[in-house]
Image (cartoon, rainbow, N blue to C red):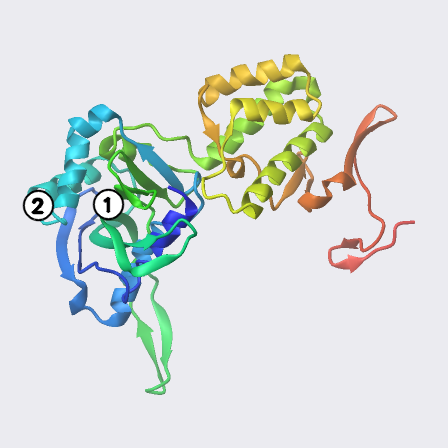
Amino acid sequence: MNEKEIGELRRRFRPEKSNITHVRGCYVNEKREIVSQFDQSLAMMTQTETEEILAILRRTLSGTLGKNLIDVSFDTSQVVDSDEHKLLMALRQSALQDENAVQEFFFRVTQSLVMEGNYMILLVHDAYDVPFRSADGFQQEDASSEVYSYMLCSICPVKMTKPALSYYAHENRFYNRDADWIISPPELGFLFPAFDDRCANLYASLYYTRNAGENHQEFVDTIFRQEIPMPAEAQKETFDDLLGQALAEECSLEVVQSVHEQLCDKIEAHKQNKEEEPLALTKRQVSEVLSDSGVSEERVAAFEEKFDASFGAEAALSPRNLVDARRFKVCTPDVTIQVNPERSDLVETRLIGGVRYILIRAEEGVEVNGVDIQIR
């Protein structure tokens, strides 16, 4: 799925646009026990409650593609005959009314998911009359090209608030507010089937994880039986290690600066061109970046070998997971320097009298602890 397709679905989660009539779910305690289940009609809720429920669900379609939102593809054999795909299809086709399928899904989630504390599983079904869109992008709201039937799952931590003293203005007095349980934004979830080319794709699902450092592979193994890319933070750490190990003595400040700038340029160009498909770089494309940064063929070959071992030869990585386009940071065991990524040229390394130094060009506007200082 691309950003435009995800955005189109996100706009569905408004009271005036959604066809969601009820929400199913269960409450799970820290012992993985289902404490209660519910099937609640949104029509029986207040407008505020409905909006809050839809806002929670909408968060399951938020974040960055390749980092928080990950495409999961099913094998053909899974779609033809597999327990995991049959269960998802039963939930979708019955609009969550197949009681056996719902109970089986709850069981699989509670037995596999590793999450601290209590949490809630929310399930909704929606049927979206997809408006016709012409080749020039013109959309006719009253002309539907097809009905996209899908289900959305959100898994939300439930946390205890702290007691607090509150002031009620309409009564002009203070009250002690008791501790209570509240639903937090979703930690993970998924959309099935995927909304590819504005149509249902039964061979794919869109998986969501809030934490870029945790993808809950145990949940994915149970629900999809597929391997997904390592978490975005782990991708960056692995990529950084690969550069240091493979490039060895050629891994200079200038090379890292060049790699950072080139990847940031690709991110910005993709954004400016408003390309719909997510930006991803293959091993060959990353190798070209290294070559353009002055890395020797020998070290590029060493990088490619380690790339295959860490990510897989056919892996395509989002550059947003490999560099922070908003920050350029230089660290030593005792000092951390953060530089505007657009001005990383102000930093250089030099060997003076046999001692290694990091030099920063500073012509004006230098402050120490908020105090303007003069360099004499």
- Work out whether residue 241 can be spotted: no
The reply, left or right, for residue 86 in relation to residue 70 is: left
Instruction: Describe the element under mark 1 as helix, strand or loop.
Output: loop
Q: Which mark is residue 221?
A: none
Work out how far the residue at label 2 is from the one at label 1, CA to CA, in angstroms.
27 Å
Seen as rendered, the residue at the extreme front is: 135
Residue 346 screen position, x and y as percent: 78, 41
Seen as rendered, the residue at the extreme top is: 298
Q: Residue at x 66, y 18 (%)?
A: 248
Q: Nearer the viewer, residue 235 or 33?
A: 235
Tally of marks: 2
Placement of the N terminus among the 4 image quadrants: top left
The reply, left or right, for residue 307 in relation to residue 362 is: left
For label 1, count other residues whose C-alpha is less than 10 Å away and answer few (under 14), some (14-19) or many (20+): few
Q: Nearer the viewer, residue 272 or 376?
A: 272
Residue 111 against residue 182 in the figure, above or below: above
Callout 2, which amino acid? Asp
- Work out whether residue 299 can be spotted: yes
Residue 352 screen position, x and y as percent: 86, 28
Q: Which mark is residue 98?
A: 2
Callout 1, which amino acid? Glu
- Residue marked by disc 1: 30
Q: Residue at x 16, y 39 (%)?
A: 89
Residue 245 screen position, x and y as percent: 60, 19
Q: Residue at x 64, y 34 (%)?
A: 262
Q: Residue at x 71, y 26 (%)?
A: 252
Q: Earlier in the sequence, mark 2 or mark 1?
A: 1
Residue 312 against residue 117 in the figure, above or below: above
Q: Quadrant of residue 208?
A: top left
